[in-house]
Image (cartoon, grey):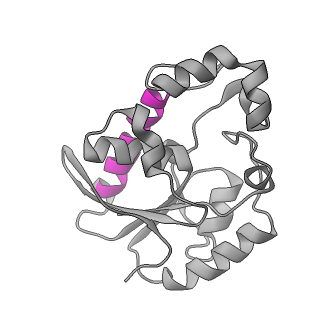
Amino acid sequence: MVLLRHGRTAWNAEKRFLGRADVPLDDVGHGQVAKVAPGLVGRFDAVFSSPLQRALQTAAPVEPDPVVLDGLTELDLGELDGTIAMNAMNTHPEFLAKWGFDPTDVEAPGGGESMGAVQARALRALHAMAEAHPGGRVLGVTHQMVVAALSCHAVGEPLRRWRKYMIGNAEMSAFGVWPGRVELLAKGLTALA
């Protein structure tokens, strides 16, 4: 199972928090996708995607009609969505301090999610993809926090260590998925062997 993070958006470039806002790829993001996609075409039995536009645009050159799976959607950042990250230190210092210590059960302000909630739904999605295609090669196009949360689970790390598993835009992490078990095989891939 390979998880591909979407290409860059203007909000990524501007260092804005980007959760559920439906922001498209920017020109750099389209270029990143154009570089990675040819090596992925025809290599998968199934392609799944988050419903957000940036993920669907990333999936399109590999599979124009991916299976949309809500469990692959990015962390809901609530009222922080769209905020420049440095400005959030002034507007939400208490939240950021708690989140920085351990994001497992800390919900983003304004109705957002915790990392624990993201991890739980992402695990359900990962197992659903694997069960739909047992023994098959599956691609999921998703987001930074989904990949990081799944990576922490796979290696048995607490969610407070999520930053170790960050990947760049249009980069991939590979997982082995079995009933009751997930293993991180590689991270930060820009191409598949």
Closest to the observer: 68 or 167? 167
Q: Position of residue 166 (x, y in %)?
A: 50, 51
Residue 174 left/right relative to 70: left
Question: Which residue is located at x 54 percent, y 18 percent?
Answer: 98
Q: Position of residue 161 (x, y in %)?
A: 41, 38
Figure check: 141 above or below 80: below
Quadrant of the image containing the C terminus: bottom left
Q: Quadrant of residue 104?
A: top left
Figure check: 106 above or below 57: above
Q: Position of residue 89 (x, y in %)?
A: 72, 25
Question: Which residue is located at x 44 percent, y 41 percent?
Answer: 162
Is residue 126 inside the magenta stretch? yes
Q: Quadrant of residue 46?
A: bottom left
Figure check: 187 above or below 89: below
Figure check: 22 above or below 136: above
Kindly give the residue lying farthest to the top in the view shown: 94
Question: Which residue is located at x 49 percent, y 79 percent?
Answer: 40
Residue 9 left/right relative to 116: right
Is residue 100 inside the magenta stretch? no
Q: Position of residue 127 (x, y in %)?
A: 31, 48
Q: Which residues are magenta?
A: 114-130
Question: Which residue is located at x 80 percent, y 50 percent?
Answer: 14
Closest to the observer: 121 or 34? 34
